[in-house]
Image: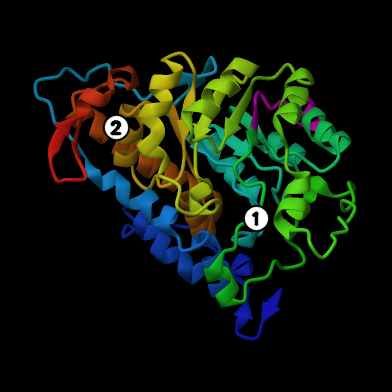
Amino acid sequence: MMTESGPTGSARAKLQTLPRTITCVADYEQLAAEFVDHPVFEYLQGGSGNEQSLQANLQVFNEFQLFNRVLVDAAKGSTVTSVLNQKLRHPILLAPVAYQKLVHPGGELETARAADALEAGMVTSTLSSCTLEDIAAQHQGMRWFQLYFQPQREHTLDLLRRAEASGYSAIMVTLDATVQASNRRAQRAGFAFPPDVTAVNLQGYGAPPAVALSPDQSVIFQGAMSEAPKWQDLEWLLDHTSLPVLIKGVLHPADAERLIQMGVRGLVASNHGGRALDGVPAPIRVLPLLRNALGQDVPILLDSGIRSGYDVFKALALGADAVMIGRPLLYGLAVAGALGVAHVLRLLRDELELCMALAGTPTVADIGPHCLFATTADGQRTLC
């Protein structure tokens, strides 16, 4: 596919070897802008509303400093951990990012190759641009399926059965994006999905019937939200699968407690990377509240804002069992395909190991609030 200025970003040649100048995720972010068209890059980078949550996700990590410790024996150090009784080589998962063919013609299949190479858990999106079956065939490690409720239950159930048949070991249901928030950066840049990048998992389901609204009805309340899932829909889903179900997009402790009481097995503290409701807190701020409400036995993952191994460490210290990365995987994918995604994962894992070693926490189980020193709103310093 061509534009007036040449091939689109997804058609540009990717790096086959990585220059030594790539040393961190920020380097990949800068390079990625050269490998995709500007409207695509703005779509990837943009958040909803005034991007308050998007900015907060990145800035909040700087409020937490690390204690170094001395004379700790790290000879048996390891990033090995487990979530839902599934062993992980490291606590860094690839998030369910949609439409990955926007940045690479191989899309999610390249990401799956990288996940295999770096022994990373991968979560496949309902809105992937490769089929969930093809992705599962490419990735032999821990794989979960992210589910969006469909307007018709039979289509939701079909997605569920396809995931079960393909060997996905858990279902991650996203609930915080029931209405598509505007991405002003993408709109200003003139972004539009190319015709060859589609949600292939939904092909064959057909478009939902149009909702006829009267002049006094709202396109949000009576329109878009008419198809939004409710508590009874989640109860129905839990009754129709034996796989563990996690809920993504949870920030309020009251929601978290009710979900676990219903039989949900784990949560993802997330604000959709700042692309859902603008103005909500960064997930890492509410992570301790969720952990206190649920105790130590409920798995809690965190996404939104992870850009380094140091960020991973801070999330683990504040109560996360693992983290997921979204935009960083897209940066790597845009620059060098599977090689780039694998390198992003390796950079994050290496930074995490370095942080663990110098902080005196040679295993993931050793990491906790005692490792952090925080700055409060009034400038005071406090132990976490």
Q: Tell me the kind of residue under disc 1.
A: Gln
Q: Position of residue 369 (x, y in %)?
A: 26, 25
Element marked by disc 2: helix
Question: Dot 2, how many residues are within 10 Å of its Cα: few (below 14), some (14-19), or many (20+)?
Answer: many
Q: Is residue 120 above or below residue 190?
A: above
Q: Position of residue 46 (x, y in %)?
A: 50, 63
What residue did someone put label 2 on?
Answer: 353
C-alpha gap between disc 2 and disc 1: 38 Å
Q: Tell me the kind of residue under disc 2.
A: Glu
Mark linked to residue 125: none
Quarter-of-image position of residue 164: top right
Quadrant of the drawing holding the N terminus: bottom right
367 left or right of 335 in image = left
Is residue 76 visible in the rendered image? The answer is yes
Residue at 20% x, 41% y is 376
Is residue 13 visible in the rendered image? The answer is no
Q: Give yes or no for contact between labels 2 and 1 (Cβ–Cβ under 8 Å).
A: no
142 left or right of 222 in image = left
What residue did someone put label 1 on?
Answer: 180
Query: In the image, which residues are magenta?
Result: 162-172
Residue at 70% x, 34% y is 136
Q: Position of residue 202 (x, y in %)?
A: 81, 47
